[in-house]
Amino acid sequence: MKRTVAILLFDDVEVLDFAGPFEVFSVTDELAAHSAFKVVTVGVAPGTVRARNGLKVVPDYTLESCPHSHVLIVPGGFGTRALLLQPSLIEWVEARAARADQVMSVCTGSLLLARAGLLNGLRVTTHHQVLPLLSELAPLATVDASQRFHDNGRILTAAGISAGIDCSLHLVARLLGEDVAARTATYMEYHRG
């Protein structure tokens, strides 16, 4: 079964937060003769997204037009702070997460999952500089910075920036087997820690 992976994009999103997982799932799909994943990007607002440090990206879909996704990825970056104050976006994340098989945050994307009430009772992580804020937003979660990511079954959280690659490869291994994840990492010349 080909799974749709939807990656949320917004102004001031951290580039590697979304580009790392995008690469992992896209390479996996390519190596599987395009039978594994359909990777799409979803903009919080219509039009071009201006990512961290000025990279411009044109998302495939808007929040309203986004297709059903088996995997929802919520990256981080400074732009998450403004999104925490947008109830309609938090409601979208909550509703989409309820229908997804897996939900993964990278870096401060976990703050949005926390605001949506998705981290209660889970072991979670985020970028090391915002661990106290995550604890504040998710008081019923166990914030644990001892690992690069935590897998709680449906909900996965990755630490800062490059940890999204590790978490994505882990999820590929869970869904398609360790051999597939290892082949993807080898192609990417990425050393898994």
Image (tube, helix red, strand yellow):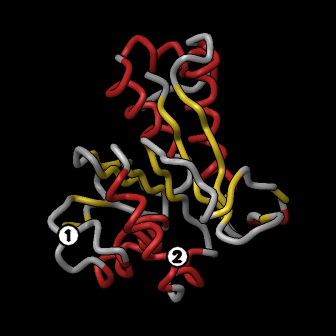
Residue furthest out toward the bottom:
85
Q: Which label was assigned to residue 24?
A: none
Q: Which residue is mark 2?
A: 89
**Tally of numbered discs:** 2
Kind of residue at disc 2:
Leu
For residue 128, what is the image quadrant?
bottom left
Secondary structure of residue under mark 2: helix
- Using residue 125 as the reference point, say whether residue 23 is left or right of it: right
Q: Quadrant of the C terminus?
A: top left
Q: Which residue is mark 1?
A: 120
Q: Residue at the location (56% across, 75% down)?
A: 80
Above or below 120: residue 9: above
Q: Residue at the location (35% across, 53% down)?
A: 99
For residue 112, what is the image quadrant?
bottom left
Above or below 179: residue 78: below
The image shows residue 107 at horizontal and vertical percentages of 49, 60
Kind of residue at disc 1:
Asn
- Distance of mark 2 from mark 1, alpha carbons? 19 Å
